[in-house]
Image (cartoon, rainbow, N blue to C red):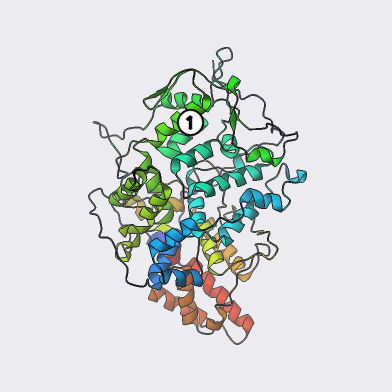
Amino acid sequence: MPIQLDRGPDPLATAPLIPETPGPDRGTHRHALLSVTLPTALAACGGGGGGSSSTPNPPVVVPGPQLSAAEAGRFLSQATLGYSRADLNALMASSYSDWITAQFKAPQSLSHVDWLKANGYADASYINSTAGLDNTIWRKFISSGDPLRQRMVLALSEMCVVSVLGINAQWRQFSVANYLDVLEAHAFGNYRTLLQQITLSPAMGYYLTYRGNLKANAATGSQPDENYARELMQLFTIGLVQLNADGSVKTGSNGQPLESYQQADVSGLARVFTGWNLDVAGLSTPYPPDVQWRPMVNTASRYETGSKSFLGTTIAAGGSATEALNTALDTLFQHPNLPPFVGRQLIQRLVTSNPSAAYVARVAAAFANNGSGVRGDLQAVLRAVLLDAEARDATLAASPSYGKLREPVVRFLNWARAFGANSPSGQWAVGDTSDPASRLGQSPMRSGSVFNFFRPGYVPPGTALTTQGLTGPEFQITNESSVAGYINWMQRVVAGSSIGDVRADYSSLLPLAANAGDLLQEINQVLAGSQLSAATLATLQSALNTLPSGTQAQLLNRIHAALVLVLAAPEYIAQK
């Protein structure tokens, strides 16, 4: 008898399913200009890229009494979604560690859920829409005063993926907004607590289809939904293969990677995620948006009370659903794979696609123990990622195998935050930027699948990265269409169109615009982390010198042209 999944009635099932729409094949064509990045290898590790475990620990880099603009800009390029001249100057007068400490203490701005409520999106007319979601996402990413937290939120959203495209529910904009609020609230907390909160979030319950999950029924042959159990292990915690502490893959006597779990582990763990559903207690129907920000609760009659075995752990029969959930998450949290698995991905999201094994090991060690015996402290992990000598040493960064492709969303946000983009209406109507032909080919919380916009182990075929055993995750959404779409859209955005009333402030650039060299130098420092070489700046200066500068309109045109040229430059797009 085929296995059937029976979840029972859905209290919010009046909304039509929004199907996941597969995108075009993005693995064939690559932007030729970007082939300058990462052409040589550190020996591969961790299933498709990384450094050799024999790499010696680099010396700790101690900056001088004041950071240079290049040092500060490079750090802020890794630690934020973009920075202004004021941000750059403030860091130059401070230190990396003090800046991080201040960021950990920075207050959070208005939550996504509260912004949606304050702006009228709890009105019944929006019950079956995503209205307001993109607005509040761009509001936070562009204008919030806690840039490290927002950088971490984007990274976590691409590791523990929820997409509004896969949520079949009323008030789906509130569901995803609440999920982002969870990520933000725990971005500097403990990974174990984060796992608990995302597991109980309605957004994840809908997206990975265990909301309303029923225990097995021998009469009908139905079995619990295994979706969340599988992805929780594969994507959020331990990965597919066993890892050493430095992220390298453990192999068996046959030389093949050792798997982290078997199908029996998935089936056993899935029994834990039965009975969980929306908390509708005290709510009138049709349900208000409140249902989407209440943690899920368990219905005893739907819960599998029998024993559950997975990953060498057995949960005895008869316990409560909450006890079983805690044991399951504790088991995954204590798994030896977790520190290198999570640590390596955070390095990839913030610093470099192919960290050395030694770098991964140091970050994993900080995850395993923050120095006070605490496991999973994300503040300690972030410090380890950003302050490691491999992150800070510009000499190491000069290696052609070092660095990462800036994902399109980050490039747009770099521009917006560099020049104080604002929305006078307060609506931040940037919209959905998913179309690769006319926009960015990527839009936050709109991934086409649980595997994110790009996989951490992706290797672009037919490139130098393939022959050198290097990963290039962001290349998975890079092709002729997305390259042209990005440049064409950013040209309009820079000039003040295509994104509602969101506009940048170029007043700091106007006094420099008559001198192309001065203008480019400022943009290089504030937007590109001083990454553009003298040769590239000279080429761009020659192009700008052909543009007139006699009027303010002509000066603004020069500024627009300079910004687009920098945003299109391979030395900017490849973050080093």
Residue 308 seen in render: yes
Q: Amino acid at mark 1?
A: Ala
Which residue is painted at 43% across and 59% down in the image?
100
As displayed, is residue 540 above or below residue 499? Answer: below
Locate residue 68, reporting x and y percent.
38, 73
As displayed, is residue 222 above or below residue 154? Answer: above
Nearest the viewer among 192 and 140 is: 192
Q: State the quadrant of the C terminus.
A: bottom left
What residue occupies the far bottom of the structure in this picture?
550
Residue 432 seen in render: no
Locate residue 409, reporting x and y percent.
53, 57
Nearest the viewer among 30 and 70 is: 70
As displayed, is residue 40 above or below residue 291? Answer: below
Specify whether 517 is left or right of 6. Answer: left
Locate residue 98, reporting x and y percent.
41, 63
Q: Quadrant of residue 274?
A: top right
For label 1, the residue is 229
Which residue is painted at 64% across and 39% down in the image?
292
Tell how many labels.
1
Nearest the viewer among 138 and 547 is: 138
Which residue is painted at 50% across and 79% down in the image?
519
Q: Residues within 10 Å of mark 1 (few under 14, many from 20)?
A: many
Nearest the viewer among 541 and 65 is: 65
Which residue is painted at 59% across and 52% down in the image?
434
What residue occupies the far front of the structure in this picture?
372
What residue occupies the far top of the structure in this picture?
219
Q: State the quadrant of the N terminus.
A: top right
Locate residue 541, reporting x and y percent.
47, 79
Q: Secondary structure at mark 1?
A: helix
